[in-house]
Amino acid sequence: MIGQTISHYRIVERLGGGGMGIVYKAEDLKLGRFVALKFLPDRVAEDPQTLSRFQREAKAASALNHPNICTVHEIDDQQQPTFIAMEFLDGVTLRHHIAGRPMDQETVLSLAIEIADALDAAHAEGIVHRDIKPDNLFVTKRGHAKILDFGLAKLTMRTGSGQAATQIAEETRMSQAHLTSPGTMLGTVAYMSPEQVRGKDLDARSDLFSFGAVLYEMVTGIGPFRGESSGEIFDAILRKEPTAPVRLNPEVPAELERIIFKALERDRELRYQHASEMRADLKRQARESESRLKRVAADSGAGAPVLSSPSAAMSAVSSKSVLIAEAKRHKVALASAVAVGFVLLVAALLGAFKVLGQHAPSIDTRNIIIRPLTEHGKVIGFASISSDGRFIAYGKREGERSLRVKQVATGSEVTVIPPEAGFFGSATFTPDSNYLYYGHGDPSNGNNVNLYGVPALGGASRQVVSDVASAVAFSPNGQSMVYVRIMQDKPENQVLVANSDGTGERVIFHLAAGSVLTDPSWSATGDLIAVGGFDLGKDKITSIFVLTPEGKLVKSFPLPSLVFALAWLPDSSGIFFVNAEKSTGLRPQIWFQPYPSGDPVRVTNDLSQYLSLSVTADSKSFVTTQERRSATIYVGDSPAVLNGKVDWRLTPVSSEQATGYGLSWTAGGKLLQRDSTFHIYVTESDGRNRARLLPDDDVNFDPVACGTGDIVVVGRALADNEVHLWRLNLATGESKQLSSGQDEENSSCTPDGKWVVYPGTLPKDNTTHMFKVSIDGGPPVELARGNLSAGVVSPDGTRVAYRKTEGQGAKLKSKYVVQSLEDGAPIKEIDAPASAVHLSWSPDGRSITYVRNTTGSTENLYMQSLDGGPEVQLTHFDSEPGIIAAYAWSLDGKKLALTRARYDDTDVVMFSGFR
């Protein structure tokens, strides 16, 4: 719709969207101002109930004239589609302000008072919002709060509720059966009031409970009611007491904690009865906080001066010199004593500054602001910002993938590389911001990625280097670059430096094959290169390595868990890095490592995953990609054949946000699964009766049912972080370790449950070996070795299939190998599609199955007969972006469980305010 004129509004850009509306920035051609236009999504625009709710939102909000409520200018239902014209707001939602960490108390109180005042105004008109949450609370650039989205607003049916009640009473009465009848829940689960959870009739006090939940999150960084499913969250709201905010943030005052808990009273008769009461208590707390700060300042000024920096100490030297000169006119002895004392004082201060400077981190995480730079959710997984902070580059999924450059200040955007087949893996601006160097996979061979250069705002691209495995980083003068290469035919992975035109390539550092090296970062001082590396093999390396451009190792920072990306602060005072630690379920979060020494500092701690890092030259901002994971398990019965196509009828069975990343059927027809935090569960085939297996602090990989009983084999990372296979008896709870090598995450069992097949490495080398081991334990038997995927056992238990890769760069080829499980004799080899993953068997054992891309953003399940012939597509998600994260057939072959994880939840965000 961008560029179109609807009524007297010219649409400029898309701002965002959700289930109940898509919002665009538009220019009002009559009044010469910007507005926000909200349209219904196409899929619901024709639904009378939804259209009624949309119109009610406009009328309810337009009746409220308050500086902290988003103003509605008009609703136009004469156009197609219907839209609401609203006040255009510049800023971010409260969700982005909180960003998983406590906000400072002054900001909390300032915003909370404005929100309470806005709710008081709405409630006075008889309007209950019913969906107060951080996403519906906006913070403008000037730091003021605005309540958005009265789409769930309801008029209380009471006499004298004001003109607004009269205005929309009829629409409300007509939709009562849908919106307010007992047993119907509307709103967002984690912020619902108890009466909302129970489907009861609501009044203004429900908003105050939701506001209390938001206020709790503002002061602690997390919500008061949490769980892994909506059922668990409902149970927490109805029965469990939230953790005291002061335990999560020691700086929360007792009175503010009291206000929060009063708002969160389950019994609404004991809760705040009016928003005006809550506003008054918040104002008193703000006044008390201000008075306390003034008292502290006065107390500090009454005594000796507080010297907060070396420059302040020097100023004190100057002032003290005047006093000494005056004293000399009276008594030489006094001058001597003062001088000696002062020298000692200055020496002590300077010594203290030196000591503190060695240990204090060079960033402050307390006031970080997170600003979304994209909101379409279709970012591939990398982002880079130009050194001047004016532009970002990122990959976007649009059927196929494209490379985009966006201006940060205006939001205008250009397509540098149009959508095309293949894989975009990185993008880096040259130091002068004139060019982009990006990685792109050869469409004919997805394993080979080459490096290209292109003008930053579009133009002809050229290949610079072949066979790269990372983004590049440039020296400060732009004449040299550093990148990573994975070697398939040598026992090492390399860090290389070359001229910016690709000539003069040389290896400066390497790790053993089987390790992983991150995107490197070159410091702005020019003398240091940082690269992260981890190797879960024999060396167990997980470190940040600091090198000279010649390859000399200057420093290493060992880490207890995996590092995925890093970026220097330009003054070389520290390194931002993305780290996946065990305590977060291997969910990558952002940290900061002071340089040359100091303890790492956590920057983020939320449910998102962060996948890249790029810092501006002024050290004031960095960008990253923020992935919000979501995955759903589907189960289907025997497939239908429609119009010559095989298609499984799949029904969703999971209600959790992100589960099903590993799937397996038990002999009893239950479903084993792993979630995004590496916990494993068992459910009925329809998703009911979900129960966790194994302790909370375990990191568990994909569970596999073995045989016809209650035995499950699972990869577990325990105290030493090494992953081994364990046998678990679901009936008795007994567990036993089956393997003792390294990297033993995945397994496959024979149908009789007697043997387990798995890949792993040995301490003496870094080659992948395929083993089988008895379910009772004992010495493993080697079946194969090389660059292998996990093996899968055939339904009859006589064969094993796996993927084997050979060669290097453009010559790299993959094939599927089938061999005897008994003696390892080869049976069959067939070419493997470049993008194929998740190898398995068809239920009859005559074919192999795998997942591969149908388009750049969609994956489907395919079957390939071992006797040859064309592959057969088994699922048809062609119009629905997403990946297949896992799938499994039931033992009788009559059911298919499949997990679809959505790609469209990754955006570019900017962090600032840390310096």
Image (spheres, rainbow, N blue to C red):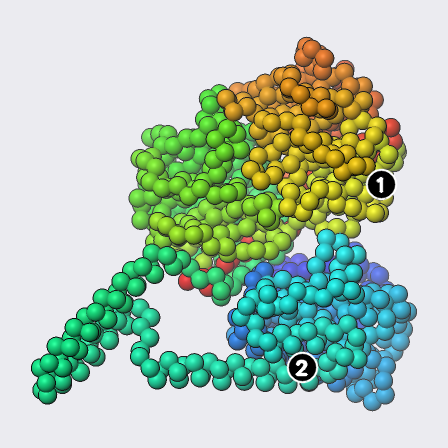
Label 2 amino acid? Met
For the residue labelled by badge 2, is the local secondary structure a helix, a strand or a loop? helix
Within 10 Å of the Cα at label 1, are there few (<14), some (14-19), or many (20+) other Cα atoms? many
| Lateral position of residue 52 relative to residue 804, left or right | right
Q: Secondary structure at mark 1?
A: loop
Mark 2 and mark 1 lie on one chain; the one further toward the N terminus is 2
Q: How far from the left and from the top, in percent, is residue 691?
A: 78, 46
Q: Position of residue 392 (x, y in %)?
A: 49, 52
**Which of the 4 quarters of the picture holds residue 884?**
top right
- Residue 683 vertical position relative to residue 642 in the rendered view, above or below: below
Apparent side of residue 618 relative to residue 328 in the rendered image (left or right) = right
Residue 810 in view here: no
342 or 10: which is nearer to us?
342
Q: Which mark is residue 164?
A: none
- Report the disc number at residue 278: 2
Residue 913, above or below 878: below
Quadrant containing the N terminus in the rendered view: bottom right
Q: Amino acid at mark 1?
A: Ser
Image coords of residue 3 (percent x, y): 62, 60
Question: For the residues marked 2 and 1, what is the alpha-carbon distance in whole angstroms?
Answer: 47 Å
Q: Residue at x 74, y 69 (%)?
A: 131
Q: Nearer the viewer, residue 827 or 261?
A: 261
At horizontal 69% and vertical 44% (from top left) the residue drawn is 695
Q: Please rate how many residues cluster around mark 2, counting C-alpha atoms within 10 Å: few if below 14, some from 14 to 19, many from 20.
A: many
Q: What residue would you read off at disc 1?
A: 685
Observer-nearest of 670 and 137: 670
Residue sitting at 54 percent across and 56 percent down?
Answer: 604
Q: Kindly tell me whether residue 292 is visible in this rendering.
A: yes
Q: Residue furthest bottom?
A: 160
Q: Position of residue 329 (x, y in %)?
A: 9, 87
- The residue sitting at 60% across, 55% down in the picture is 606
* Number of on-image labels: 2
